[in-house]
Amino acid sequence: MVKKKYSTVKSKDHLSTDIDSASTPDNKLSGKNSFSRNLVCVGIGASAGGLEALELFFKNMNPKSGLAFVVVQHLSPDYKSLMVELLSKHTRMNVLRAEDGMEVLPDSIYLIPPKKNMTIFHGKLFLTEQNHQHVINLPIDIFFRSLADDFADRAIGVILSGTGSDGTLGIRAIKGAGGMVMAQDDTSAKFDGMPKSAIATGLVDYVIPAERMPKELLKYVEHPLSNADEEEKDLSIFENSLAKIMALIREKVGVDFSYYKPNTIIRRLERRISINQIESFEAYISFLQQSPSEVNILYKELLIGVTKFFRDTESFEIIKQQVIPQLLKNKEKDETIRIWSVGCSTGEEAYSIAILLKEFMDFSGQERDVKIFATDLDKESIEYGSFGFYPESIMADVSVDRLKKYFTKKEKGYLIQEDIRKMVIFATHNIIKDPPFSKIDLISCRNMLIYLKPVMQKKILTLFHFSMSKNGFLFLGSSESLGDHTKNFNTISSKWKIYTYKEGFTSENVNDLLVPNLSQRKKSKDLTENAFNVPVGKNVNTENIFESVINEFIPPSIIINENYEIVHIFNDVNKFVNFPAGKASFDILNLIRKELSTTITIAIHKAFKENKEIVYKDFKLKEKGSIILLNIKVKPLKEKSNNLRLLLIAIEEKKTYRQKSTDKHQQSVEYDTNQQIKDLELELKYTKENLQATIEELGTSNEELQATNEELISSNEELQSTNEELQSVNEELYTVNSEYQNKIEELTQLNNDINNLLKNTSIGTIFLDRNLRIRKFTPAVASAINILDMDIGRPIHHLALNSLYATFIEDIENVLRTLIPKETEVQGKNKNWFFMRILPYRTVENAIDGVVITFFDITERKLFEEKIERKSKLLISVLNNSPIASTILDNKGNITYANQMAEKVLGLSKKEIISRNYNAPKWKITDVHGNSFPQSKLPFSIVKKTAKPVFDIVHNIQWPNGNKITLSINGSPIFDENEQVEGVVCTLLDITEKRKLEDKLIQERDLLTRILENSPVAKLVIDKNKKVTFANALAKKIFNIKENHLSKGITLKKLGIHPQGSDLLKPDIVEHVIHKGGSVFNIIHTLHYSDNSRLTLNVNASPVFDESKQVVAAVLSLEQKTS
């Protein structure tokens, strides 16, 4: 027979390998990121019926909760997911489709994309392709496990509606890491498979409807103990509370957790306190005392074990390649391989080792008896593992080949096959206080020691070393170490903590390992201590000496307690004790061989009842054609420190001999009995023959039925496989259908909105297909053209539309061909005006699928424009015929309008004017003296800057013929609808002639002034108020007049002239000249000065008239008179 090659390649326990590699994506990360130690991440698993639950969940979740949410669903790979759009309507949080390497941030929702599995590492999401080689993909389990590894006690798992059991293994990991778990109650879940599977584990903290989850979740995370910083905890303050709680659990459950690390217990206590919304440890102690159910829940919390099939694939590969072959090599064919799975939880690792052993034995052709003792403190876990039924989600950890070979597919999971089940013996066992097994070839104790205090770790490692055979192996968790026991073991794999037994072990605690505390009765000078006393520094293997003494002097013996449970075994008792398959029991009455059962049962009863040693000698036991003479001794023992009642059952083999005939006397005595036996045997023979014939007939029928059964099993397996595929597809399709159903409702609402818009809008619209057939139109279009409902489906050119304008149909065809919109104004059937647009019809995919024609009624606007146009024409007419030159400038200073007078003033035609800017160089703008004129002083610049009118800005410009003219310009702003200056209106006045006249008058005035100044006659001008306004040089000298006197308007009285003897200043003279217009001639006037000198003047006075013949001033001529 050709043997199949025993693979040395890693077995593809597919998704577990995927998880291990995905959880440490070294190629994705470099350096540190902003991963927050305080961020709480909520993983949400949902499948069929989950959309409604998700909407309710996020509708009731505070968008500023500070939590991050990751939603994992079973999505169809063949359809586009609409979850981002659908969930965005129910929350203000960011809803994002996850991308590879995307960092998880607070107040955000991340959705798994189709065809992908997702993990999280250091706060970043990583995507991998789904493994299509397997029937069922379990994305929720995959993500939840990585979430537990990454966020530990800040991980929260939520299971919503869905079929199957995805998420069940994941929540176990979250709970084991110290996180919290919620599940939707089965009454509100549309599909209760996933929630029920999660609830059945007993690990779910909240079972409530989806809409209530946010409130409870926020209460949990906002509880002070949920936010406590692990590094800042002072454990000393918890000592008293912990002691009370541990005592309470020991009293109610019988288990002492005092040897557990305080941090582990405190974390799980804080979680229970937060879940129950209790304010303190003291209040929780009171709650525990009043609630037995909470004590049981807390007990289960403390026992939570994280396990799975082939956990840490690489470590099991080493067991497969290096340990198991050595186990078989070290054992003879008739010897038993003994394995102890300590803290086995629900048995996955024990079965994993059994599968590896079975694989190697089938491959190598070596058969061995295998006993795997799977022990744990938790009775429920032991019962679960003993039954051997696991959910479908184990497909994440077990390859398809192994599932087919070693499991039987059932409706909701997989049942371990009988040949594997027989290898494993399950039993409740407390490693801390119960005695260990002996002569163990492989001890597997993974990730249990990390929860215990160092002193207990040391004791258990000592116990393991004592329990191991000389060629034994030890398999610990990857986070555990040997500590001080490194010298007692050889290392096979330091990474995966696999070791072998090493001789030279010192027996400092050997006495403690037999029965708990038995050695305490000998703590004074013990015989054993004296027997093995050796010089200091000598390395003596006292354990081997101890074991040799036991083997030499103690017969095969069993110690039992008063419950008849085996406490310890000395030497090989396999001849007398059978360990049956199925659920394990350490009850001696169930394990002892039938031939010995009655005798030993009676001896046990008598020994306990009478408290004395019971001995049976020369007991005959038949064994393969031989008779073994046994001495059976049952002796009471007592362990003083714990007041335990124990029995020692010693079975000593006296001698063995072949079975022979007895002497004649005995034959004679037994003759009658033998004859009766022969008669009975003959009768039994006939009965057997008849029975044999019946059996043969039944055998034939059984073979036929067996063949039929095998065919049915094969067909059933195929149907089961097909059913699983259909179930998976059905879940995906249900999810897709739910999304589409929501989208259909949304589109229906949108369609209603569009229909209402089309019916009630005042914009006429026609929709044409690619063949220019009418697809739809709005009622408002009927005011523009003649169209009826019966025209739908007709080509547009069938309607009489050329009345709109001649090229209407041609323009439609051009738009469809060129995709360039067309806009124009048309007059409809009722002489109303419309703004018409012809546009290409674009689909969501941006494909062109026709034409859209819109008609917007602009009749009112048209009438208003016509009115404005009429007013504008009137205004233009007025401006054109105005005698004042007018121009309009835009906001850049360009002249946009000039009336006829402006053409005349500027010496240019209208066309030439409009083509110029206000400050064009061709104007050659200067001031009136020919100097350059600043641009900022021009009317346009001032008005644009200030938004206010300006007046009488004077400057020169030059005509094309070289003539210069002087303009006086006024400017006013023109405002747009936003009150911004959009132009300027300017009026231009040609003041060239006026300026010339003014210049001439100035020249004449200057000449007259010079004449008066140089006159030999003193001249004074007096206004109507009798103030001097002018005095020539001689007058200033005579009257001592200063310039400031004239500017202030000094009167004659203040000139300092003594008027005595003079009539010059008499009021009637002034009145006569100024008010009556009369003249005065040749009046002699003498001035008296302060130095008594005199000056005689001849005074003449004449009035000055304005244009209206009114007197405005008097002119006095004062001529010095000589004597």
Image (cartoon, rainbow, N blue to C red):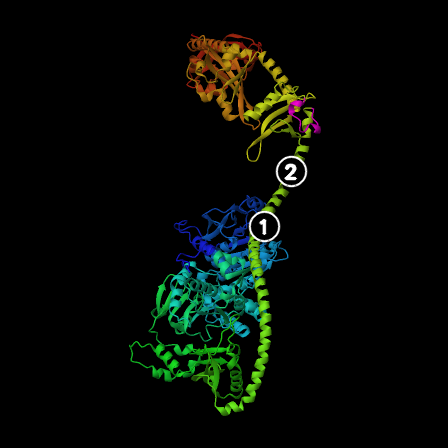
The magenta stretch spans residue 765 = no
Q: Residues within 10 Å of mark 1 (few under 14, many from 20)?
A: some
> Does residue 132 sit above or below 441 in this rendering?
above
The quadrant of the rendering that contains the N terminus is bottom left
Nearer-the-camera pick, 878 or 757: 757
Can residue 119 be seen?
yes
- Image quadrant in which you'd find residue 701: bottom right
* Residue 380 x %, y %: 54, 68
* Residue 275 x %, y %: 55, 62
Nearer-the-camera pick, 455 or 341: 341
Secondary structure state at the residue bearing disc 2: helix
- Image quadrant in which you'd find residue 976: top right
| Residue type marked 1 | Asn
Nearer-the-camera pick, 508 or 1085: 508
Secondary structure state at the residue bearing disc 1: helix
The residue at which mark 2 appears reads as 751
> Does residue 124 sit above or below 382 in this rendering?
above
> Does residue 808 sit above or below 272 in this rendering?
above
Residue at screen point 52% across, 81% down: 597
Q: Which mark is residue 329?
A: none
Q: CA distance from mark 1 to mark 2?
A: 30 Å
Can residue 990 be seen?
no
Q: Residue furthest bottom?
A: 665
Q: Residues within 10 Å of mark 2 (few under 14, many from 20)?
A: few
| Residue type marked 2 | Asn
Q: Bounds of the magenta span?
A: 786-799
The quadrant of the rendering that contains the C terminus is top left
The residue at which mark 1 appears reads as 730
Nearer-the-camera pick, 877 or 746: 746
The magenta stretch spans residue 795 = yes
* Residue 411 x %, y %: 58, 59
